[in-house]
Image (cartoon, grey):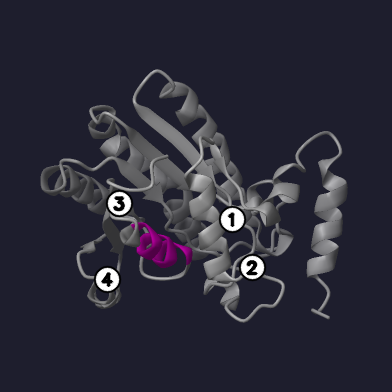
């Protein structure tokens, strides 16, 4: 992917990976548009990054996605990069009762929202000389975290959808990438001070470097072992991983 001269729409751009990625791409001479549900947070980010634009978007709401898709096409005709980054993560218990509100929110935001947004923008992206869709999944798509089974499942589903999307767009100008972060120091599960997680700016710097290559999967080094796990014997590492997480940090 070329790293400058793009018009880029990033969902979930008010905090964490989304904001840091938006700011890094903004500094590389791209027109960046971020989205989120809270106008005050959008204003804070754009205020700190003159020239960046923002649009309110509720990823759980199909009508909001349709309206924002139409507005993006009208207001930013050179839009050529979509980054599906918005996501929510909650602790759950797959061996007990499910919280219906949590289930609906997580599936709608992490899976249905990206699918709907792609559908709203893909015909426009096909008309661009060069375009990119980046779906942000997670290493938990490949090694699920049992205490967040619903989140892990949505990321596994997004990985599967991304592979189908890549095949379907293989004869077009649209390249499909998957960004699978490891554990990063963000607000997700209050991980900003988590010593076992990757520092956010270190993650962003390595991610930008990989984005600039000709790759379909954007993986930092810390993500590679978990990405490589799926296969006939994958449960052994899944079991070990979750046993480790169940212990208090040393």
* Residue 55 in which image quadrant: bottom left
Distance, label 4 to label 2, CA atoms, is 24 Å
Is residue 58 in view from this perspective? Answer: no
Residue identified by numbered label 3: 9
Q: Position of residue 224 (x, y in %)?
A: 70, 48
Magenta stretch: give its range. 17-25
Q: Is residue 244 magenta?
A: no
Distance, label 3 to label 1, CA atoms, is 19 Å
Could you tell whether 23 is left or right of 17 in the image? left
Q: Position of residue 197 (x, y in %)?
A: 66, 70
Q: Residues within 10 Å of mark 3 (few under 14, many from 20)?
A: many
Dot 1 or dot 4, earlier in sequence: 4
Dot 4 or dot 2, earlier in sequence: 4
Does the residue at mark 2 contact the one at mark 3 (Cβ under 8 Å)?
Answer: no
Dot 3 or dot 4, earlier in sequence: 3
Dot 2 or dot 3, earlier in sequence: 3
Distance, label 1 to label 2, CA atoms, is 9 Å
Q: Is mark 4 on a helix, strand or loop?
A: loop
Q: How crowded is mark 1: few (under 14 residues within 10 Å), some or many (20 or more)?
A: many
| Residue 181 marker | 1
Between disc 3 and disc 4, the foreground one is 4
Q: For the point 27% across and 39% down, which residue is it?
A: 120
Distance, label 2 to label 3, CA atoms, is 25 Å
Distance, label 1 to label 4, CA atoms, is 24 Å
Q: Is mark 2 on a helix, strand or loop?
A: loop
Q: Position of residue 114 (x, y in %)?
A: 40, 46
| Residue 49 marker | 4
| Residue 67 marker | none
- Name the image quarter holding the N terminus: top left
Could you tell whether 195 is left or right of 129 in the image? right
Residue identified by numbered label 2: 198
């Amino acid at each position: 992917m070329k790293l400058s001269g793009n018009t880029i729409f990033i969902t979930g751009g008010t905090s964490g990976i989304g904001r840091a990625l938006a700011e890094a791409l903004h500094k590389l001479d791209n027109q960046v548009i971020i989205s989120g549900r809270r106008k005050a947070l959008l204003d804070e980010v754009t205020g700190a990054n003159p020239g960046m634009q923002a649009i309110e978007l509720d990823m759980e709401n199909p009508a909001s996605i349709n309206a924002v898709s139409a507005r993006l096409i009208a207001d930013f005709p050179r839009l050529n990069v979509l980054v599906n980054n918005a996501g929510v993560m909650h602790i759950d218990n797959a061996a007990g009762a499910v919280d219906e509100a949590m289930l609906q929110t997580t599936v709608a935001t992490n899976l249905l929202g990206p699918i709907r947004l792609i559908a709203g923008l893909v015909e426009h992206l096909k008309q661009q000389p060069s375009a990119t869709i980046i779906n942000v999944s997670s290493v938990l798509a490949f090694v699920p975290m049992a205490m967040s089974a619903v989140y892990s499942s949505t990321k596994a589903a997004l990985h599967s959808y991304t592979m189908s999307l890549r095949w379907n767009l293989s004869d077009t100008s649209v390249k499909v990438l998957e960004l699978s972060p490891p554990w990063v120091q963000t607000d997700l599960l209050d991980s900003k001070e988590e010593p076992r997680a990757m520092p956010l700016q270190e993650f962003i710097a390595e991610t930008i470097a990989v984005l600039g290559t000709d790759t379909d999967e954007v993986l930092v080094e810390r993500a590679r072992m978990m990405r490589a796990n799926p296969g006939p014997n994958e449960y052994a590492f899944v079991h070990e991983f979750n046993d480790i997480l169940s212990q208090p940090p040393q």
